[in-house]
Amino acid sequence: MKSVQTGTVGTVDVIDVERPVPGPGDALMRVRACGICGTDVAFLHMGGMPQGPGGQTAPIPLGHEPAGEIVEVGAEVTGLKAGDRVVVNPQGAPSGIIGCGGALGGMSEYLIIENAVVGKSVAVIPDSVPFDVAALNEPMAVARHCVNRSEARATDKVVVFGAGPIGLGATIWLKLRGVEHVTVADVIPEPLETALAVGADAVIDSSREDVTARLAELHGQGANALGQPRPDTDIYIDAAGVAIVANTALRSAKWGAKLVVVAAHKKPEPIDLGAMLRSEMTIVASQGYPTEIFEVTEEIAQHQELFARLISHRVPFSDVERAFELTLTPGAAEKVVVTFDEQP
């Protein structure tokens, strides 16, 4: 079968590997769609996974956002049968995180689901859910954990920085949670249009607008701990991963506001702790999906038309190199999903 792994810096290699054979407790999935994530792009920039103190890299299988159908189950597997449509938990594989340094990658024609336990390593999805939408399950679990960490209430006013898949996913979950007002900020106009399409109440083009002033217009006027005027924004979500976002939140925050950081900041960056003191701001980190990986599955099925709007490009596996080129080009794509409809 064909499988994708990291190549030289900035490239992928499509290699031939043996089609896996499931053991008694495993299931074999035919991959029908797999999303490309910013983590995949990070591995491409490094040329693989760093190994040891010397900084050398080794190639790794890619893809941790697969959806597909079961073609074979081991004798000890219960709750699964051939023909079931499924999504997987990339962190549930004993051989390591799928597509993130583990032995397996979801950007392959077939994927072994090790220790296939429904609700733990795999979940069945309704036949009505397209595979490309189902492939959003993993990133939407990341976005859901972020919203859960925010503890947003219906009366809260929230701003999401970054209109990528995680920021837009958080926007969807916030609105489905009943949050009163959600604003999305980004420097690229096209994703802001998508933000409005998936339910954002307002958007801010932060490349040309004063974010703090616009938030005051949208959310009203509050004050920090010193009584200085600040936007009445309750929660700031950093889904962008740049220092200016964190510092904008710190300097704009009213007394008792919260900052939730879900984006990966690639290097240490200075932040204004004095501004944090003036607002008594709470900073919360959000990593992965400790419980959310299958918490989101049913709701994605219920609101599949909404989540489908997040996909900007569907690229066949036969053209997978182009799919990764799109994700490596800033501003070229919002969410790329590779489809496997042509496989035998």
Image: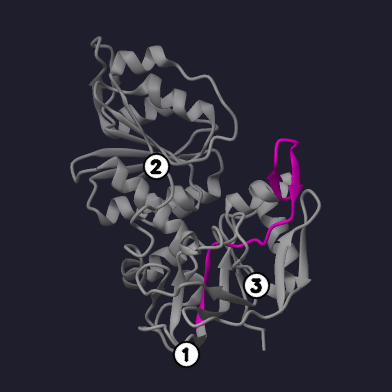
- Residue to which mark 1 is pinned: 82
State left or right for residue 287 relative to residue 100: left
| For residue 193, above or below residue 215 | below
Residue 29 lies within the magenta run: no
Crowding at dot 3, Cα within 10 Å, few <14 / some 14-19 / many 20+, comes out as: many
> Is 285 left, or right, of 152 in this rendering?
right
Q: Residue at x 43, y 50 (%)?
A: 288
Measured as percent of width and height from the top left, residue 245 is found at 48, 30
Q: Earlier in the sequence, mark 1 or mark 2?
A: 1
Checking the image for residue 108, the label placed there is: 3
Q: Quadrant of residue 306?
A: bottom left
- The answer to whether mark 2 and mark 3 are in CB contact below 8 A is no
Q: Are marks 1 and 2 in contact (CB under 8 Å)?
A: no
- Which residue: 62% across, 78% down? 340
Numbered range of the magenta stretch: 47-69
The amino acid marked with disc number 3 is Ser
Q: Which residue is mark 2?
A: 286
